[in-house]
Image: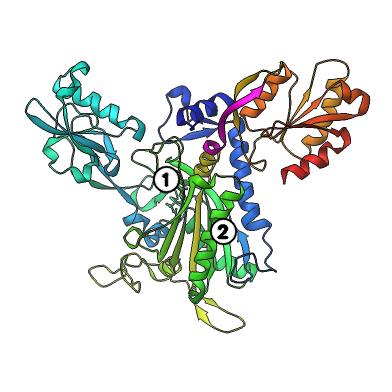
Amino acid sequence: MTTSMKDVIALSKRRGFIFQSSEIYGGLNGFWDYGPLGVELKRNLKNAWWRDMVSSHNELVCAEGAPQEFAMTGIDASIVMHPQVWKCSGHYDLFFDYMVDCRESKKRYRHDQVRGRWVEAKGRRIFVTTVAEADDEAEAVLRRALKFFNVRASHAEELKWIGGFQSLADAGDPASVLGPDASEVGTLTEPREFNLMFKTNVGALSADDNTAYLRPETAQGIFVNFKNVLNSLRIRIPFGIAQIGKSFRNEITPRNYTFRSREFEQMEIEFFCHPGESEMWYRYWRDRRVQWYRDLGLSSGKLRLREHAREELSHYSNGTADIEYAFPFLPEGEFGELEGIAHRGDFDLRSHMEGKLAPGTRPLQLEVDEHGKPKYRGSGKDLSYRDEITGEKFIPHVIEPSAGADRAALAFLCDAFHQDQAPDDSGKMEPRIVLRLHPRLAPVKAAILPLVKKGGMPEIARKIYAALKKQCNVFYDEKDSIGRRYRRQDEIGTPYCITIDSDTLSDGTVTLRDRDSLQQRRIPVERCDEELQRLLT
Ligand code: GAP
């Protein structure tokens, strides 16, 4: 059975993974809150990333597939940074999407998200548009065309559709376009640039000279701290600096649940290396990062690595690959970005030294104003690196694996969602929802369940619970029949259930139930801790 986004969203809300932000006030588009289980899932994901990329990395040996040994470290930079950072990074004048406004409905849309179809009826030909999700766009356009031409649904054959869906940009003839919420044609404006950075003011006064921005990426906090890290740790290149933190983008039309949010978390690494070795490191990080998702259980058939074509590359990039996942809200065969791995060359360090570089120049040149002066001045600080052993001085190249924690959490949630059959208390097979989350990601690692609320079983169960709780997030439940309790745990992805029954009282063993195989085996009470640790790693 294919996973539907509606089922995932319903489960998320019902069991406390994700809620709409400020829901009691009607919500705020593009903002989401993680509930009691969601916060555990997302934290487990971020911890897995930090542990696998940073804290468990052994810089003394050459990691599998790596060109040589390398070091990894981390920082936690502030969200609001000096405004000059964003001028030099290119975000101030290049970080925009195209929007169109509707003069009639006063609504604003992202230009590339408005799609539609040409249709003819009653001697008129118009382009009917919508911003509905892929699954709903055909119905939305039909409904709007019927209304526009005043045709009943039972006479839908009066509408003559010309060609399939196409983007607004490809439609041509703006005068014939029926905007997504308009009742007349020709109400959409020409596309205009819309900068995605959220503005704020530093200090009590609101004036142009204290305008600051909420960071749209965590990466710049790493670049501006490059020298600080280098000097404080005295590490040699190649090395990586990692950071996890919030980023903010004023997306014109946030959509697809948490996939495109206005506030989200990134997990980014800036890996600094010798320019002559950067291609090797680019390939290493690209392959290593895709393997990370596989190791945590994302289905291979839904995961792919896609190299960008030349014309798709960002202004700074010498090569980029996206790790993509076939999210259920996308049409069959389409994929959405989970993470980008970019070869950024020396763009960032040089921009923060010299001033903003001109996009498109090769090799990169300083962007100058009409007086020949730097358009945006850099820090003037020397961000080059001198190798103590070889004496060589150079500006390091950067490879950047940049992942989204919310997108990854959503992909793992969608991928884990399954509907199958499991026996109820009487052994009859009944449909069940099960989240097959990797044990490292599962919000609850084990449920401790006394079979009945008497006969000394709850007392033993509470002791086991107290001992395991010191190691990991376990859950105690004595309400309802055992079958219903298993079902509740399956639905939130708990990989193991430990049941205390009458045999426990006589032989000191408990049953350990596996969520996926449904197999149950007996283990001694005193081995619960050790066995769980073994299964969870
Ligand atoms: N420093 C490079 C950078 O920020 P990006 O492709 O714009 O690159 C990296 O963002 C990752 O951040 C994306 O692959 C995605 O996982 C996540 N991301 C970006 N915009 C997002 C949004 N509006 N909502 C949720 N996640 C987002």
Q: Which residues are magenta?
A: 413-423
Q: Amino acid at mark 1?
A: Phe
Nearer the observer, 398 or 306: 306
For image coordinates 37% across by 68% down, the residue present is: 355
Q: Quadrant of residue 142?
A: top left
Marks 2 and 1 sit apart, C-alpha to C-alpha, by: 20 Å
Q: Amino acid at mark 2?
A: Arg
Nearer the observer, 397 or 366: 397
Residue 375 highlighted magenta (yes or no): no
Instruction: Please provide percent x and percent y for residue 447.
Output: 73, 29
Q: Residue furthest right?
A: 506
Establish if 63 lies above or below 146. below
In the image, 218: left or right of 510? left
Q: Quadrant of residue 463?
A: top right
Nearer the observer, 453 or 238: 453
For image coordinates 51% across by 57% down, the residue present is: 401
Question: Which element type, helix, strand or loop, lies under badge 2?
Answer: helix
Question: How many C-alpha atoms fall within 10 Å of the one at disc 1: few (<14), some, or many (≥20)?
Answer: some
Q: Which residue is mark 2?
A: 288
Question: Which element type, helix, strand or loop, lies under badge 1?
Answer: loop
Which label is found at residue 335?
1
Instruction: Please provide percent x and percent y for residue 222.
Output: 52, 60
Residue 415 highlighted magenta (yes or no): yes
Q: Residue furthest bottom?
A: 391
Instruction: Please provide percent x and percent y for residue 30.
Output: 42, 36
Is any atom of residue 344 visible in this view? yes
N-terminal of the pair, mark 2 or mark 1, is: 2
